[in-house]
Image (tube, helix red, strand yellow):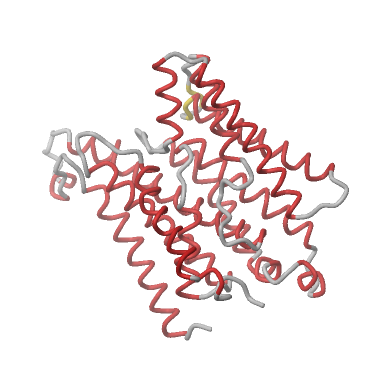
Amino acid sequence: MIKADKLKFFFLTLIALSIGTLALAPFIGMTKVTLAMLTDAAHTGIEKDIFWRIRAPRTLVSFIAGCGLALSGMAFQAMFRNPLATPFTLGVSAGASLGAAIYVRLGMVFTIAGASGISIFAFMGALLSIALLYGLTTMSRNFSTATMLLAGVAISFFFSSVILFTQYISDFTQSYRIVRWLMGGFEVSGFDSFFNMFPFVMTGGAILIYMTRELNLITTGDEIATSRGVDVVRSKNIVFFATSMMVGGVVAISGPIGFVGMMSPHICRLIIGPNHRFLTPATFLFGGSFLTICDTIARTIIAPAEIPVGVVTALIGGPFFVWLLLSGVLNKGIFYDS
């Protein structure tokens, strides 16, 4: 059990990191933007437009997306009692990607209530994946996390094959757009994307914070959780829907961004332990800061060109994944209470 003073220091550090990241990231970029330019009413350069229409919205979107992906990974790791579970384990990301691929292949261009057509199609694909997964799981005679996991893997593989087929029958431009979207990124202008994503992440996050006790007990095993008064099936269904809607809302706008949901919970868990009462808010703050920093690196390291942020997170996440396997951390019992 981590001591109270260390826990307090860790959370103060996370809060400072989050505030610092949100405050400084919009000022970093190829075009110099200073606070004086923003506060000077007489300044008529493009710096204000760059800051308020591109950088500030992008920073907020990347932060809230990181929060959602990190919380989703934490919830799935607890629900499946598997430290390698990610937000994309159950195929919601594959469904969203299929929706985006179909939109590109059809050559459609439209916007509804500030949401782009590709985001709407992606979210519809995510909803389709959630509905199929829930239907397959409830049709099974023996509901279990193993059944849900296998159904999610099957759906993910099927949708991935349809994406490949869609890409194959597309022309060069459409194929490139599909590949680029699958790499993940934040190509936002204005605050519409933030306001579209915000309700999903905040609602899902609030549900997970409310269910920290259930998550703690579920990680010890279904039998122990049941003996402590937890309705395991109901709790897992709530976590599944809350997390899946959160993932769908994020992926519909940003595309699939890997490793955030696997790394963030582990890093926080290694520092403060597996108690979800503290792990949930810590993962929320760390995930948002981490993805915002990665996105800042992605858009500046080879400016004026830009690297998809999913490439940056994969470059960091790959070595981290190998370290988890080789260091023996996964076998030290730090991830779940027993």
36 vs 211, left or right, is left
Q: Is residue 304 above or below residue 84?
A: above
Which of the 4 quarters of the picture holds residue 190?
Answer: top left
In this view, the residue farthest toward the right is: 141
The front one of 56 and 281 is: 281
Please tell me which residue lies in front, 98 or 191.
98
Horizontal side of residue 91 vs 266, given as left or right: right
Question: Which is nearer the eye, 194 or 327?
Answer: 327
The x, y position of residue 263, in whole percent, is: 46, 59
Relative to 331, does residue 153 appear above or below in the rendering? above
On the image, the x and y values in percent for residue 99 come to 57, 27
Q: Judge from the rendering whether residue 282 lies leftward or rightward of residue 85; answer left or right.
A: left
Estimate the x, y position of residue 42 in percent, counting from the top left.
11, 38
Residue 6 position within the rendered picture, expressed as x and y whole percent measured from the top left: 42, 82
Considering only vertical position in the picture, is 200 above or below 337? above
User: What residue sits 34% from the left and 46% below the top?
Assistant: 312
Question: At 49% from the left edge and 26% from the top edge, which residue is drawn?
Answer: 118
Q: Quadrant of residue 12?
A: bottom left
**Which of 26/310 is in front?**
310
Give the residue at x 77% y 66%.
222
Name the residue rendered at 39%, 57% in the picture. 319
Q: Is residue 29 left or right of residue 141?
A: left
Classify the position of the C terminus by image quarter: bottom right
Count how many numbered circles sit on residues in the image: 0
